[in-house]
Image (cartoon, rainbow, N blue to C red):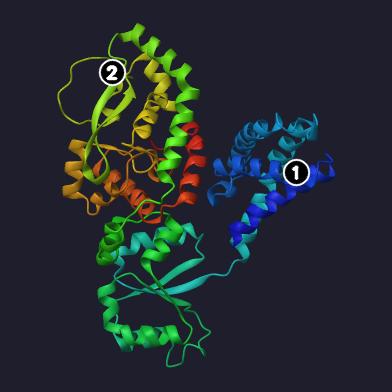
Amino acid sequence: MYGAVVHLFDIFLISVMNIFLLRFPIWISIVASLIIYLGLYSFRVYDKDTMKSYTESFIRTLFGTIMGFVGVLIIYFFLEDFFNRHFFSANLIFTIFFLPILHKVEYNIYEKYLPVRNYIVIGRKEDIGHIMDEISQKTMNKMRFVQYINPSPVTLEKLVFEGKSAKEHTAKIHGIIIVDPKLEKEVKPQIERYKSEGLEIQYLPTIAEKYLKRIPIEVAQKFKEYYEVVFNNVKEYPAKRFIDILISSIALAILSPVILILSIIIRIEDGKPVVYKQERVGLNEEKFTMHKFRSMKNIPQENDAKFATDEQDRILKIGKIMRPIRLDEILQFYDILIGNMSFVGPRPEQIKFVEEYNEFIPFYWARHKLKPGLTGWAQIMYKYSASLEEAKTKLSYDLYYVKNRDIFLDLNIIIKTIEAVLWKRGAV
């Protein structure tokens, strides 16, 4: 609720500024404000970590506003008569000088006045305590997990209500978090009674997904039966393929001059082949050929899968330009067009890595229930993984996407991909 208010208030303020200061028609002001807002959103201006720091907020607001102006320019050429020459300068000054201050104030209000809620955790701290600590941190310590218990009906009753009913209880405990379904069975009747009496009862998957925006492997294992059912019944939303064809067709048309130029430069620098082809694992673990511009020297290598970070000495001069802004990946729009990939989805992994991860990482198979993507939730939320432990963390974001994917999450990812490229977040 807090987040929605902040977002809507910014749109309202930018609209009001354009209406009263620049004398814009109401509908033009609202449309322009929404486009600028999307630019701000794409650069994570509304993340709490950004709002906490004035400097970070200022930088991201500047880039986000400029990105919004790119969108405004699209409608500007069709509605030029409704704009005036002060639009861009006035909006830039307003956003970069006013919004960072406003967001810092809003953050301080949230941190100071939002009430703290205390919870009993049914589960062992040694098993899941690090996940609970992360959730508490993400809520700015507004959710506190005050006691972990391996419960019995007597100890739970004493801790929660001290002999009182839930309706009478107004003391320190606001709810119960179930992090271990096996332990929950020991006190199931009490949990049902507390729920009927109005005490907040939550399950770990719900709060982990809500606040972490990922599904940690530990959580998936604790609730194995639930997640197995979810992941085994994954289906893509109907419009996905249409969106993929539309985006890839437009992208290939627009980027065709870039494709030609890069092909010539690579050929001149290091000869043939210009295109690098590699077998990757796709939908339902079927193998397909993925295409990229070759960004490394054409030196014979051992036929072993390697992390990109292990091959820095082979990168071409043009590769050093292409790779940071991911121009080497644009040929994958062709893979999207022919149906081997999707624009949004888990990144396609090398066969050797998939075989290893399937053996050592629980639920790794679930990421292959969808087509692999050019960009994805894990790519915009996490860094490039170069170890087994990092692969586990990255998988937790892929699992969140597989479970929660819809057109709105895809749009969220698409909007934030530009920021991920410019900020060098993650890797594709």
Q: Residue at x 34, y 31 (%)?
A: 335
* Mark found first going from the N terminus, 1 or 2: 1
Q: Nearer the viewer, residue 158 or 153?
A: 153
Q: Secondary structure at mark 2?
A: helix
* Camera sees residue 377: yes
Q: Quick one: which residue is furthest to the top in this view?
A: 268
Residue under label 1 = 29
Seen from the viewer's position, the closer of residues 372 and 252 is 252
Q: Describe residue 230's horizontal placement relative to residue 26 as left or right.
A: left
Q: Is residue 200 left or right of residue 12?
A: left
Residue 178, placed above or below residue 340: below
Please state the horizontal and vertical placement of residue 405, each as a whole percent of the image.
41, 52
Place residue 262 in its image quadrant: top left
Query: Percent from the top left, x then y, of residue 309?
Result: 30, 29
**In this rendering, does residue 428 appear at all?**
no
Q: State the quadrant of the N terminus.
A: bottom right
Between tags 1 and 2, which lies in front? 1
Query: How far apart in space, not on screen, are marks 1 and 2 (Cα)?
Result: 51 Å
Circle 1 Cα neighbour tier, 10 Å, few/some/many (<14 / 14–19 / ≥20): many
* Residue depicted at x 33% and y 46%: 394
Amino acid on which disc 1 is placed: Ser
